[in-house]
Image: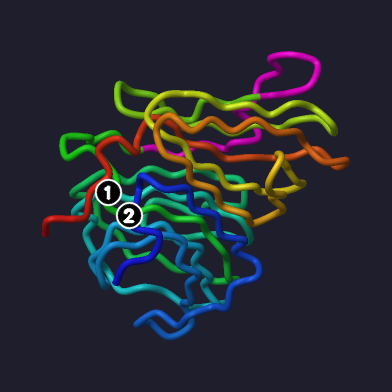
Amino acid sequence: MKINADFTAPALVHSEQEDWVASPMPGVERRMLDRIGDEVARATSIVRYAPNSSFSAHTHGGGEEFIVLEGVFEDETGAFPAGTYVRNPPGSSHTPGSTGGCTIFVKLWQFAPDDRLQFHKNMHAEAQRVDAERSVAVLHEDGRERVTYAEVAPGAAFEVSDPGGMELLVLDGSLSDDTRTLHRGSWLRLPDGTPFTGVCGPEGARVWMKTGHLVDAAAPTA
């Protein structure tokens, strides 16, 4: 399966307009944003767990990172409420589920093979005021990528020109540039050398963003 598999081209999905697709596990559904592969895949998805649903125990051969968008995500390491950012590196394993139901934004098979850093952070608590119009949290940074969360004021400029490509997910509010408007749930991926220059809507915006990671984008090998 290939969905938005050309990483040299822009990709935009307004996820809240997409249908939910059943996963192999009862009560777990997905909206696929990009994907190369079948059940073992390099994938970016929105995943919804119904109350009292779970996925079978599994190991992440290529790592997993996710944001809890709604509800509380649960596994052996804890219960993670909305606003939590989690990194589970290659070789980590768990049995994910949710007692009350939850929705997450998740990326699979996108870690460096030797990355072994595992952690979780409350994005809102990490955000620090950088100027009068924005607060920013640096969630993860290494020589390969930079992951951030931003809270930006209404009408403020939103510009990204980092090398190595970028992707962002609008968690709340809106962003627009000359050609498109992104609302809650909109996911945008831009290749290396393609900047984003826009402005926040009248309600401001909360945005998760990753940069630098698309120059070596590849499908899983196992």
Q: Report which quarter residue 196 is drawn in.
A: top right
Q: Is residue 152 left or right of residue 146?
A: right
The residue located at (32%, 67%) in the rendering is 2
Front residue (pair 165, 96): 165
Instruction: Say which element carries label 2.
Output: strand
Label disc, if present, on residue 63 of the rendered structure:
1
Q: Is residue 122 magenta?
A: yes
The residue located at (39%, 37%) in the rendering is 119
The quadrant of the rendering that contains the N terminus is bottom left
Residue type at the position of mark 1: Gly
From the image, tell me which residue sits under label 2: 108
Label disc, if present, on residue 98 of the rendered structure:
none
Looking at the image, which residue sits at the far right? 202
Residue 143 in percent (x, y) is at 30, 21
The residue located at (49%, 30%) in the rendering is 139
Instruction: Say which element carries label 1.
Output: loop
- Mark 1 Cα shell of 10 Å, populated few (<14), some (14-19), many (≥20): many
Looking at the image, which residue sits at the far bottom? 26
